[in-house]
Image (tube, grey):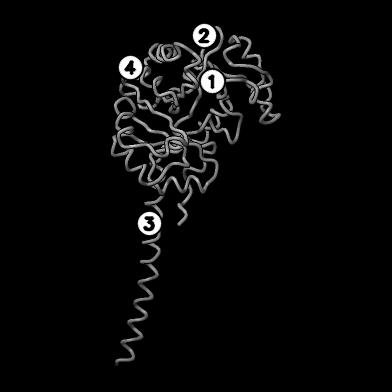
Amino acid sequence: MKRKFTIFSLTAILFMSMFTVPVVATSSEMLTMQQQQQIVNVAHRGASGHAPENTLSAFDKALEMKADYIEIDVQMTQDGELVVIHDTTVDRTTNGTGAVGDYTLNEIQQLDAGSWFGEEFAGERIPTFEEIIDRYRGKIGILIELKSPEQYPGVEEKVAEALIKRNMHKPNNSKIILQSFNHESVQRSKELLPNIPHGVLAGLTWADITDEQLAQFATYADYFNPNMNIVTDELVDRVHFAGMKIFPYTVRAQEQADNLFKLGVDGIVTDFPEYVYKHPVKK
């Protein structure tokens, strides 16, 4: 009888394990996926790993890939029009040369902003800020970076005017964020648009940021968005303690996204939106 009992027990254990082990693994996997899907997916200059940065093709691709936000860079032309381009010169991403601020809107829109990335994008234009917000508002979030605002006096007012004209400055509009490396510009913008979330960008030199500095930022900013290379779990905790969220930049590899996910960030700025979701975390 003792032998029969042992065989029966082993059989029962094996039978039960067939059902219990997969259930535990599946639950764990589902939890991981749910956590990842809560991270805000920001397409850096659009889905710029797939199409030329800061063009309609890149922004359309980000929308197609179901990113949560597109990140755009705003500068100003010689005749005071707002355009979307990253560098303060047109040399790297167009067939032109010279400073953005030396071109009129008509002149800068004659440039080819796509061929450098691929022949299939020949003829892409540098879009205007108003063109972008009109095309994408209500469809995807827009993270607006004021690029080198110190070179463009009054740019904060012009951005605010364009948003207010479209009623995009209301407190229930959670799909517009403004940010800049120029923290004085962020403060000016926040005064003009108090109901829109703002963020301060931080480069590698902010690796040793103090709690006092974070607290100061938190008086006018809702986000502290640093270079991903200075992000640690301790920094994430301190940013959260100061009452801000953290969107590190710029992910260009799956391993980088996985690492930031494990550090508990709120969002990830990436050239490749597919790296931020639908991938299990590597143990």
Q: Visible in this render: residue 35?
A: no
Marks 1 and 4, Cα distance to the nearest angstrom?
A: 23 Å
Mark identifier at residue 84: 1
Q: Amino acid at mark 3?
A: Ser
Marks 1 and 2, Cα distance to the nearest angstrom?
A: 13 Å
Q: Earlier in the sequence, mark 2 or mark 3?
A: 3
Q: Nearer the viewer, mark 2 or mark 3?
A: 2
Q: Earlier in the sequence, mark 3 or mark 1?
A: 3
Q: Which residue is identified by label 3?
A: 28
Helix, strand or loop at disc 1? strand
Marks 4 and 3, Cα distance to the nearest angstrom?
A: 45 Å
What's the residue at 65%, 14% (across, down)? 110
Quick check: 153 above or below 247? above
Residues packed near mark 2 inside 10 Å, few (<14), some (14 to 19) or many (20 plus)? some
Mark identifier at residue 80: 2
Q: Is residue 129 left or right of residue 107?
A: left
Q: Which residue is identified by label 4?
A: 191
Q: Amino acid at mark 4?
A: Glu
Q: Is residue 271 left or right of residue 18?
A: right
Helix, strand or loop at disc 3? helix
Helix, strand or loop at disc 4? helix
What's the residue at 45%, 52% (across, down)? 281
Query: Picture quarter containing residue 47?
Result: top right
Labels 2 and 3 touching (C-beta < 8 A): no
Q: Amino acid at mark 1?
A: Val
Quarter holding the N terminus is bottom left
What's the residue at 35%, 27% (across, down)? 174
